[in-house]
Amino acid sequence: MKTLSKSLLVAFLLTLTSVSFAKADVYMSFVHPKKPVTFQSSLFTTTEGKLRIALNKQTGGAVQVRIVNRAGAEVFSKQIGKNRQNARLQLDVRNLPDGVYQVSITNGVDTTTQELTLATTPPVTATPRLIAFQ
C-alpha cells in the first residue's frame, strides 16, 4: 500500500509541475508578445501589363499580400512564410476589369497600402486620308 501511495504522490507532483510550466509559457506569451517582423516592399508595373511586388522581410513572422477591388472582394492573396526573407511576385493584371484596386501588405500590426488603377485606353482610330491624283 505504501508503494501505491508513493507512486500516486510522484505522479501527482509530476502532473502538477508540468501543468504549472505549461501555464507559465502561455502567460509569458501574453505578457511579452513577439515583436512583429519588419518588412520593405516595392511595387511596379511592366509594359506587358503585369504587376511586380518585391518584398524583403525578417525571418520569424509571416507577411500577407492582398489585392482587393473597390467593392472589397479579394482578388489575390498570398502569405509569405515566416522562414522566408524575400519574395518576388509577378501578377498578370491584364484580365482584371478596369477599376481601382488596393494592394495591402501586412505583418499583422503594420500595413502598407497602395492604390492600383487599371484603365483601358480606347483604341485610336486613324483619321481617313484623302489621296487624289491630278
Image (cartoon, grey):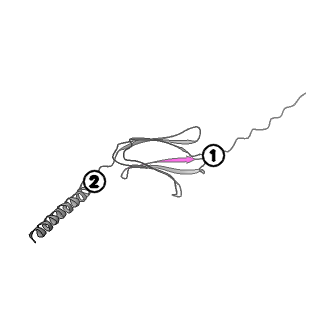
> Which residue lies under the disc numbered 2?
33
Position above or below: 15 against 94: below
Q: Main secondary structure of the magenta part?
A: loop
Residue 72 in the figure: left or right of residue 106: right
> Which residue lies under the disc numbered 1?
120
| Residue 107 lies within the magenta run | yes
For badge 2, the amino acid type reads Pro
Position above or below: 88 against 23: above
Q: Position of residue 92 (x, y in %)?
A: 56, 44
First in sequence: mark 1 or mark 2?
A: 2
- Nearest the viewer among 59 and 5 is 5
- Nearest the viewer among 128 and 21 is 21
Q: Label 2: how many residues lie within 10 Å, few (<14), some (14-19) or many (20+)? A: few
SS at mark 2 in the image: loop
Residue 87 in the figure: left or right of residue 130: left
Q: Label 1: how many residues lie within 10 Å, few (<14), some (14-19) or many (20+)? A: few
| Residue 44 lies within the magenta run | no
For badge 1, the amino acid type reads Thr
SS at mark 1 in the image: loop
Residue 129 in the figure: left or right of residue 84: right
Image quarter of the C terminus: top right
Q: Position of residue 72 (x, y in %)?
A: 51, 57
Q: Where is residue 27 in the image (x, y as percent from the top left)?
A: 23, 59
**Snapshot quadrant of residue 33:** bottom left
- Nearest the viewer among 65 and 24 is 24
Tell me the mark number nearer the camera, choosing from 1 and 2. Answer: 2
- Nearest the viewer among 95 and 13 is 13
In magenta, the rendered stretch is 106-130
